[in-house]
């Protein structure tokens, strides 16, 4: 790796996450990432029940492939999620800060219905009031709900190309926000960065014009307040991102780096994500 690149890009697979408290797991490929995530979600749900309370989870739409697997596991075991609460990390908004319609092809709420809730046997599915998405018209309701539930058992998620988690976008270059202040940001409505809109367009046919400019997101405060963190990376471009997250500075410029301030963080990546990034012209 040449001198002009950051030192963290030189971190080999064998030394990833060393000198951090992050627990790293490397699995083979994208299907294995999805399987691991489904099993980890089930494990957290069962562990909470064994402790005497229904689980409360913050969950993403991205990664996504874990949900049909989890539905199959729950149906096979006849395991009820009736009182389990799933809080979605985020949702796209219209230009006037309302949820995109649930029928919108990019709606995260719609995806959860199609690929998880509707796949569960109806008697096993979470009650409608336990299927939560942050409300752009009442963003403070999320923290009150979390308090009522006694906290969040675990946060599950992915990591964006600019290091965002949920839609907690890094500050623009002219903004100066300390890591400590950024960690206290609550659920809120915000603009999406150009980087996020661009990479998100890749997964929907490459048409950036259809990606909304606005979103509502669970805040860093609520995410970092979860008792456990479980993050997953299954895209080849995340090879560089995870090195910045694990071995670059802890900074608001890379929101996921703040996970290193949490005492219980699990990061699972595909083998090709763990390998050194191949930075060259082709």
Image (cartoon, helix red, strand yellow):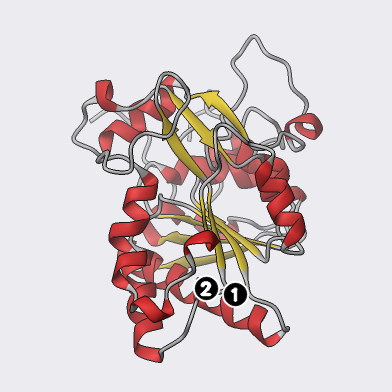
Left or right, 93 with reference to 72: right
Residue 263 image position (x, y, % from top left): 77, 60
Residue 40 is marked as: 2
User: Seen from this angle, which residue lies furthest left?
Assistant: 205
User: Against 98, is 13 above or below?
Assistant: below
Position in image of residue 117 (x %, y %): 36, 65
Instruction: Give the number of the mark in front: 1 or 2.
Output: 1
Instruction: Name the residue at 35% across, 84% down.
Output: 75
The residue at 65%/42% (across/down) is 257
Helix, strand or loop under label 2 = helix
Picture quarter with the C terminus: top left
In the rendered image, which quarter is residue 122 located in?
A: bottom left
Residue sitting at 52 percent across and 73 percent down?
Answer: 40
CB atoms of marks 1 and 2 within 8 Å: yes
**Picture layout, residue 36 above or below residue 99:** below
How far apart are the alpha carbons under marks 1 and 2? Answer: 6 Å
Q: How many marks?
A: 2
User: Is residue 163 something that shows in the picture?
Assistant: no
48 with respect to 237 (left or right):
right
Question: In this view of the protein, which residue sits in the foreground, 50 or 147?
Answer: 147
The crowding category of the residue bearing disc 2, from other C-alpha atoms within 10 Å (few below 14, some 14 to 19, many at least 20), is some
Picture residue at 58% right of the left edge, 34% below the top: 168
* Residue 56 seen in the current view: yes
- Displayed quadrant of residue 177: top right
The crowding category of the residue bearing disc 1, from other C-alpha atoms within 10 Å (few below 14, some 14 to 19, many at least 20), is some
Could you say which disc has been placed on residue 129 in the image? none
Q: Of helix, strand and loop, which one carries label 1? A: helix
* Residue hosting label 1: 44
x and y, in percent, of residue 20 in the image = 72, 55
In x, y percent, where is residue 66? 38, 65
């Amino acid at each position: 790796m040449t001198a002009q690149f950051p030192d963290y890009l030189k971190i080999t697979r064998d030394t990833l996450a060393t000198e951090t408290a992050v627990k790293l797991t490397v699995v083979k490929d994208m299907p294995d990432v999805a399987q691991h995530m489904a099993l980890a979600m089930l494990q957290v749900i069962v562990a909470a029940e064994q402790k005497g309370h229904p689980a409360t989870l913050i969950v993403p739409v991205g990664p996504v492939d874990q949900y049909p697997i989890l539905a199959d596991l729950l149906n096979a075991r006849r395991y009820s999620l009736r009182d389990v609460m799933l809080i979605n990390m985020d949702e796209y908004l219209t230009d006037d800060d309302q949820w995109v319609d649930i029928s919108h092809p990019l709606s995260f709420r719609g995806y959860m219905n199609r690929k998880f809730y509707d796949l569960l046997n109806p008697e096993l599915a979470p009650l409608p009031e336990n299927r939560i998405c942050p409300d752009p018209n009442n963003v403070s309701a999320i923290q009150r709900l979390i308090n009522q539930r006694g906290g969040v058992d675990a946060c599950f998620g992915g990591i964006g190309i600019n290091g965002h988690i949920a839609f907690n976008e890094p500050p623009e270059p002219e903004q100066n926000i300390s890591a400590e202040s950024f960690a206290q940001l609550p659920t809120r409505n915000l603009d999406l960065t150009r980087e996020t809109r661009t990479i998100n367009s890749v997964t929907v046919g490459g048409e950036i014009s259809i990606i909304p400019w606005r979103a509502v997101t669970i805040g860093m405060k609520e995410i970092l307040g979860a008792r456990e963190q479980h993050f997953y990376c299954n895209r080849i471009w995340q090879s560089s991102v995870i090195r910045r997250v694990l071995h670059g500075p802890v900074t608001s410029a890379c929101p996921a780096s703040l996970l290193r301030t949490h005492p219980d963080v699990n990061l699972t990546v595909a083998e090709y994500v763990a390998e050194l990034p191949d930075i060259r012209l082709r």
